[in-house]
Image (spheres, grey):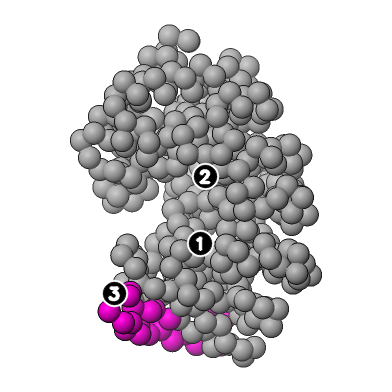
């Protein structure tokens, strides 16, 4: 079987499907590669079941929007304030962060990024009167951007077909092009998103308060984000992908109660899944913690595979719990902690973790092995452990076959 066939068989639960190994995110390798083609090729050389990932469409604003950015020095011991002002015909929106250590964008402040919320002084959307201005920032992709996206998608699809690889949409996100507001939605992948976008625009607390204090405002805001996101999702489907990924890191019960999930999030997931399935495409849902209390709702929505089963850092994601509640009902992708085991553990710990993941989740017939979320560390220890992970996986799956 080709890598594509192995991955799709594991997602679908095809009889006799072996456990593939495909890394969710692999920054230690991708940062060394010129482009997606080299990244996929080098994964294949390691023996992995690589995917070919599409970059997302650029995020652009209506031509009437004027953007101003500036840095304000702070007092001794405090990080400078970086502000971006969006001036629109319907009013202005302001975003401000502190440039604490680790801020990766210099004196630029993108609209979307995981780096924003923990550094934010204020977010651009704070009240119902901000919605009309926000509509000028959330415009559908333009014809030129769609054409460029589909042309590159066609090249990647040919490459994927030539090498027997799965084509993934909604995967890659972050790239800031000089001179453009082109920080694509998402910190690394999972660029198909509603609630994560909500958190970037509004912060991690305010939407939860609005759910009780101003539910009509929250519903309207989520509806606006869903409409904008779905226009982008439809273009990924037009590109002929095999699977689309929705980043749902902020959709678990670490943030939302099950009742709020059912009311505010589940309908958006269900509509996404319906659209994706109409195109004959699988729907992947990236959630690494807080999943257990809403697992039945995720199944109800028709999701094909949950990406990010992290037994080390997730809540309610022990391998046994996941198998007991979801085993055989849905695809499961993950099984080994990236930072705790692959980056910081010993080779013996890696081997043990792989053996445990395959022993427990491999029995479900719908399992893809991966470190969760990422392997970032470009160290001798990390690369030794990557090698140990792959060797252990191959020895176990080859013996099983």
Task: Give the mark nearest the N terminus, 2 or 3.
Answer: 3
Q: Which residue is mark 2?
A: 168
How far separated are the C-alphas under marks 2 and 3?
44 Å
Q: Position of residue 267 (x, y in %)?
A: 76, 53
Q: Is residue 17 visible?
A: no
- What crowding class fits label 2: few (fewer than 14 Cα within 10 Å), some (14-19), or many (20 or more)? many
Farthest left residue in view: 380
Against 62, is 187 above or below?
above
Q: Position of residue 140 (x, y in %)?
A: 61, 70
Which of the 4 image quarters holds residue 326?
top right
Instruction: Examine the rendered structure and indicate whether residue 286 appears above or below residue 384.
Output: below
The residue closer to the viewer here, 313 or 43, is: 313
Magenta stretch contains residue 75: yes
The residue beneath circle 3 is 77
Determine if the magenta segment contains residue 139.
no
**Residue 265 rendering spot, x and y as whole percentages:** 71, 54
Provide residue 313's location: percent of width, then percent of height: 47, 39
Q: Secondary structure at mark 2?
A: strand
> 14 or 397, which is in the foreground?
397
Question: Is residue 112 visible in this depiction of the protein?
Answer: yes
Q: Secondary structure at mark 1?
A: loop
Mark 1 highlights which residue? 185
Magenta part of the chain: 60-83
Q: Examine the image and state in which quarter residue 39 appears.
A: top left
Q: Residue at x 64, y 88 (%)?
A: 90
Residue 188, above or below 15: below
Q: CA distance from mark 1 to mark 2?
A: 16 Å
On the image, which quarter does residue 15 sit in?
top right
């Amino acid at each position: 079987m080709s890598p594509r066939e192995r991955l799709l068989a594991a997602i679908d639960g095809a009889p006799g499907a072996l456990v593939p190994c495909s890394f969710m995110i692999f920054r230690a390798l991708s940062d060394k590669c010129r482009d997606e083609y080299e990244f996929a090729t080098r994964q294949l050389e390691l023996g992995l079941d690589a995917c070919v990932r599409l970059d997302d469409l650029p995020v652009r604003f209506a031509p009437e929007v004027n953007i101003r950015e500036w840095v304000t020095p702070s007092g001794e011991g405090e990080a400078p304030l970086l502000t971006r002002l969006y001036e629109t015909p319907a009013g202005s929106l302001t975003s401000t962060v502190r440039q604490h250590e680790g801020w990766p964008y210099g004196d630029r402040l993108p609209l979307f990024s995981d780096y924003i919320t923990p550094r934010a002084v204020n977010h651009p959307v704070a009240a119902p009167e901000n919605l009309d201005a926000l509509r000028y920032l959330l415009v559908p992709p333009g014809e030129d951007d769609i054409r460029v996206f589909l042309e590159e998608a066609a090249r990647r699809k040919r490459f994927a077909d030539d090498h027997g690889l799965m084509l993934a949409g909604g995967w890659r996100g972050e790239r800031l092009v000089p001179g453009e507001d082109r920080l694509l939605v998402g910190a690394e992948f999972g660029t198909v998103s509603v609630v994560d976008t909500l958190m970037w625009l509004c912060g991690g607390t305010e939407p939860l308060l609005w759910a009780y204090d101003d539910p009509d405002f929250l519903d309207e805001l989520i509806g606006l984000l869903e409409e904008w996101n779905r226009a982008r999702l439809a273009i990924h489907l037009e590109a002929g992908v095999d699977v689309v990924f929705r980043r749902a890191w902020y959709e678990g019960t670490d943030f939302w109660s099950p009742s709020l999930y059912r009311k505010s999030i589940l309908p958006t997931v269900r509509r996404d899944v319906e659209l994706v399935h109409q195109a004959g495409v699988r729907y992947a849902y990236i959630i690494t913690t807080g999943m257990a209390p809403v697992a039945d709702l995720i199944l109800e929505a028709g999701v094909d595979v949950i990406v990010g089963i992290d037994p080390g850092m997730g809540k309610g994601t022990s391998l046994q719990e996941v198998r007991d509640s979801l085993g055989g009902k849905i695809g499961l992708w993950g099984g080994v902690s990236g930072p705790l085991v692959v980056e910081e553990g010993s080779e013996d710990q890696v081997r043990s973790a792989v053996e445990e993941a395959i022993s427990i989740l491999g029995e479900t017939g719908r399992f893809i092995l991966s470190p969760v979320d990422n392997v970032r560390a470009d160290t001798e220890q990390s690369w030794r452990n990557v090698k140990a992970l792959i060797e252990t996986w191959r020895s176990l799956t080859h013996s099983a076959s």
